[in-house]
Amino acid sequence: MRAFFQNDYGEGAHPLIMQRLVETNLEHTCGYGLDPYSLRAAELIRQKCGRPEAAVHMLAGGTSANAIAMAAFMRPYEAAVCAASGHINVHETGAIEATGHKVLVAASKDGKALPEGVRAVCREHTDEHMVHPRVLYISQSTEIGTVYNKAELLALREVCDECGLILYIDGARLGSALASSECDVTLRDLADIADCFYIGGTKNGMLFGEAMVIVNPSLQKDFRFMIKNRGGMMAKGRLCGLMFLTAFEHDDYFAWARHANAMADIIRGGMERGGVEFFQRTTSNQVFPVITREQEAALAERFAFEHWADLPDGRVSVRFVTSWATTEADAQLLADALGAL
Amino acid sequence: MRAFFQNDYGEGAHPLIMQRLVETNLEHTCGYGLDPYSLRAAELIRQKCGRPEAAVHMLAGGTSANAIAMAAFMRPYEAAVCAASGHINVHETGAIEATGHKVLVAASKDGKALPEGVRAVCREHTDEHMVHPRVLYISQSTEIGTVYNKAELLALREVCDECGLILYIDGARLGSALASSECDVTLRDLADIADCFYIGGTKNGMLFGEAMVIVNPSLQKDFRFMIKNRGGMMAKGRLCGLMFLTAFEHDDYFAWARHANAMADIIRGGMERGGVEFFQRTTSNQVFPVITREQEAALAERFAFEHWADLPDGRVSVRFVTSWATTEADAQLLADALGAL
Amino acid sequence: MRAFFQNDYGEGAHPLIMQRLVETNLEHTCGYGLDPYSLRAAELIRQKCGRPEAAVHMLAGGTSANAIAMAAFMRPYEAAVCAASGHINVHETGAIEATGHKVLVAASKDGKALPEGVRAVCREHTDEHMVHPRVLYISQSTEIGTVYNKAELLALREVCDECGLILYIDGARLGSALASSECDVTLRDLADIADCFYIGGTKNGMLFGEAMVIVNPSLQKDFRFMIKNRGGMMAKGRLCGLMFLTAFEHDDYFAWARHANAMADIIRGGMERGGVEFFQRTTSNQVFPVITREQEAALAERFAFEHWADLPDGRVSVRFVTSWATTEADAQLLADALGAL
Amino acid sequence: MRAFFQNDYGEGAHPLIMQRLVETNLEHTCGYGLDPYSLRAAELIRQKCGRPEAAVHMLAGGTSANAIAMAAFMRPYEAAVCAASGHINVHETGAIEATGHKVLVAASKDGKALPEGVRAVCREHTDEHMVHPRVLYISQSTEIGTVYNKAELLALREVCDECGLILYIDGARLGSALASSECDVTLRDLADIADCFYIGGTKNGMLFGEAMVIVNPSLQKDFRFMIKNRGGMMAKGRLCGLMFLTAFEHDDYFAWARHANAMADIIRGGMERGGVEFFQRTTSNQVFPVITREQEAALAERFAFEHWADLPDGRVSVRFVTSWATTEADAQLLADALGAL
């Protein structure tokens, strides 16, 4: 059995979540996210965000969450702006375009959209023969494991205010981002800065589930109609409610994310000992070493991970991902292997 | 605590399902429905359907399943045909139209599309100024609890062959339909007659999940692209796989449905003893008595159920729904209350 | 050569229009409807409507105009409401659904939506599992040649105010409607009552062209983006501008429509002399006699017209349409033929 | 009055076209492009292309034509590939995305998609989490006036065959391209190489109109339904038919284009005499000099043209466009002015 670093959605849910699901399994509630668990989870998230006026909706997955938000927030000729590596731009099989909206690419660095890049896109789109940029989409942490700090987020907020953009944050890996040593951003900061963001559950301890936090009241209207219109309303919505309630009532959500990051730190430590180069420096739960093809083949016998990129010099980058479920023993095993390269 | 007859998605999952989820919770698998559980579940369903060439995909919910199928099977100017009470026509917040397709209404009786009604729609839509009917959508059991028998399905199949229609069956409550005393249709029959249908898990013992069975090979191409494009691909696809595997490996799926129907039979028995009129005669897990407003108010103190319709004579119809989770004691309690009206 | 009563778009443009097109043919203007002719035509229409704040956009055709307006005015889960015979419901090949919106059918009489029918649709659509009615679509004159009078329009306006609906009027045959003897509505009335309507040029003297008048300021934003987004922006927008300018600068638009109606009156006179039954009584430019199949065949040798409907008693209804181009001689010929049945 | 070089759609139609429109103005025909003129024009275009099996449809404008074709040819998860400067990518206000499809950008040179760029896009899009490239969109001539020669088109055809792409050519300025001195491609070559292309009328002598030639039979099915579904079917379709018939019956289409190119040659001659640098070398009807801001201001007093780009060195590029309507006197005037810079 190979130690598992392939992704952060390879297991079920954190045992605490499973326990709560089993305990409440035979309770009767109403459906579609209007049950007491969902209502309490939403209220709890509003409190944690310090935003009593926020609307909170729990959804089943990230692509669905992104597509519903984009369709809800934009008129047909409006477009989302993001980094080239943005999940909506590359890895959602055109789900945003399927809602009728173009995705525009802004210049980025380390997977993070640059304020000047966003400004440039807005400057170039000026007349009615072009789409009108309307949403700035960023991911926290990014698709390549980097993290926006507070200054970076505030700089993007400023661009959004200048250009009339909605700031939307894809938080599929928000836990790992906020728990990162490099990140000085809290949930409250996020709620202050963004118009809307979602808190990812699928990749941090839940069976599935993303909590959409719509901070800006002007974006809240009829969002449940949009959820249903796009097939995103779960009959047993209570499942999401209960899972988020469990994750947030004692802040386990962040504890699980800290664990994932700590396991990644162990791996990064091994790399440093072995003098292994980073394809992309990260402080979150994704680690990208540069190794040779032979090393990749050797590691693949003992570890499950993903091939990431072929490099011009013949070497490769691979990706190791940790999660709440990664054991210290496994992380140490990998660190040792990398340290011995 | 009121006895619960409000719907068939008011609890979690059948305890056997929960047990299997807990047992396998820490196993590592790959994501997106390509894991061993999903593959084995798909293979098992193919066997149960007697259709080794069928494509089987597990999806998270009914509206999403319907919208993905319609978007996958039709070109932009093509339309679905269904009964006026069809779920896609009334209760999906325009999810089909959101994929760009019109829903045409055919004449129906007891919630079931009539062959002559479908033919009439096709006859009326003849030129390029009108949409082109392409999919016949029916629900088994229907939205009002009735069930198509084999002869009725074969008659619709004949219309579909005549008119070039795809026969698609929404099986959100397929378990209860096939387990109904009135129904002479097996899963194999369904797979012989329909081009595509889905086996509903959400309303029969699972946390969520619908298994789309695409029998017709010409409709199978790139369906996974469509799932992702519409936000329906779950990262932890193994959950659906495992739930369907559990439900079908010893045919518990049908046992659970038989139980639900038996509980509904107890309720129907009470109605007959009390001389309570049926708004709609059914043999599946939905029961629709006609009662007075006073009786409705009295029952509502002891039972959770839905108000269904206001009748011209001042009376009302209400809906009682049973499931795998309904206890015989609760059903008997309700039967006694109805018997005493 | 058979006398032509098949439709009101069987010729080119009124000779006055052609003359102006030829005279201005070699002038240089900027494109996309920002030329002086388009601006002056828009201003003239605003004046004629008594609505200096209205936005006026000239579009190439009716289906395109309707689809652009519906896409511009509604959010994804919102729906249009119309009579069963509404053009958007039947004869636009799903163009509205292609923009993602459902079309709901309200009860109607003589092709006209009934206030109570519209109210009923709104009463039935109350929760987030159903689409939300947002636009009331009516046609003036209707698809079967009938005309809303002022009281009828005001009654619908009242329903719209009650239910939060936008009142949209498809004026493909607006000229004939307003020129009808039965109609007590002026262009100013229309602009007072409707949120948006279009003035049809294609069926009243122009080569093509419909002038969308958006009276309600809250619906005006970025409409030109919507036009371009849906492929409706013409490079040589000046053509529409010039044609509308020509039609409205001396109110020829209404003179042409009155001529069409007068020709239809001649035909109706013939029917009355011959005791020919009306399938649908009209005062606009469409006439629907009920005749036998033999009479239809005989008339078809001398006149071009459309078969409209097969009646239960074996007879048929046919449709004769007049226009600015119908000659009195032809109308008289047809009247005599009908009078002699 | 400034000499007009702002675009190639600043006038009405070629006088010959206007004459034919006037001559036939009062003829009666049936509508929607099924009239004798449209049928004859389609047949004539098939002959000129040497493709008796081609389907030919006349449409009102380029954006509409592109959007209808993309919507007709692709399934929802499929994408178009084009150069960054591709009209569908930049200047159609998201019309392609509004049909639900992503536009992918391939590496290009001089506005022309490079075979290796297209291959790279296809190589990168391999799994169901990404859109599937399906149509290669190129413009002939390109948006910046360059022209694909036969070898270049054949190389792209080869890529399309390798990668399963449909080759679609936007011929908004096809006349000027085929008439270019640099271009060794005939209409027959184009029909041999492309799966589908359109012959632009709006920018070469007509009031409006683009003739879509669908060479590949597998793409022809129900295209008229698609036209109507997208609001592109004109009631008086005969206008397009007559205009294309007039333009092609004596090959005036190409004569008009040759004239436009000859006028551009005069301008290019002036530039060479004046030693004016080309922003982009072209042989078609668009000319892009590099000048100073002062020169731009001075020229703008005597000539109408477009500002094209701000260059890093403080200079600018401007665009002069010629057409069938450009007079030799005006061209000479501009050439002299440029020659004197």
Image (cartoon, coloured by chain):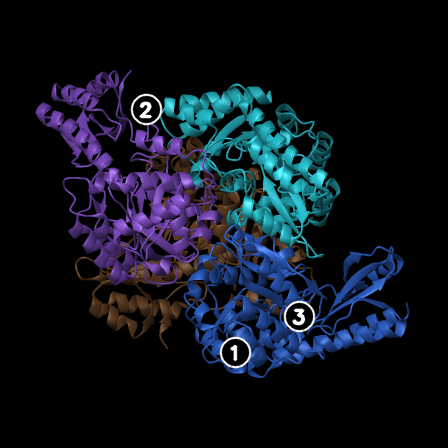
Chain colours: A blue, B brown, C purple, D cyan
Q: Which mark is residue A45?
A: 1
At label 1, counting other C-alpha atoms closer than 10 Å, the crowd grade (few under 14, some 14-19, many 20 or more) is many
Front position in the image: D88 or D279:
D279
Which quarter of the picture shows residue A223?
bottom left
Q: Amino acid at mark 3?
A: Ser
Report the side of C183 relative to B43 (left or right): left
Percent x, y of residue B27: 69, 66
Front position in the image: A172 or D332:
D332
Residue identified by numbered label 2: D26
Q: CA distance from mark 1 to mark 3?
A: 19 Å
The quadrant in which the C terminus of chain D is found is top right
Percent x, y of residue D172: 56, 36
Percent x, y of residue B8: 42, 63
| Residue extending furthest toward the right | A340
What kind of element bears circle 1? helix
Which chain letter goes with mark 1? A
At label 2, counting other C-alpha atoms closer than 10 Å, the crowd grade (few under 14, some 14-19, many 20 or more) is some
Q: Amino acid at mark 2?
A: Leu
Percent x, y of residue A270: 85, 74
Q: Are marks 1 and 3 on the same chain?
A: yes
Report the side of D220 relative to B323 (left or right): right
Q: Which mark is residue A141?
A: 3
Who's the residue at 17% across and 39% down the image?
A: C180
Which chain letter goes with mark 3? A
Q: CA distance from mark 3 to mark 2?
A: 68 Å
Residue D145 vertical position relative to residue C107 in the rendered view, above or below:
above
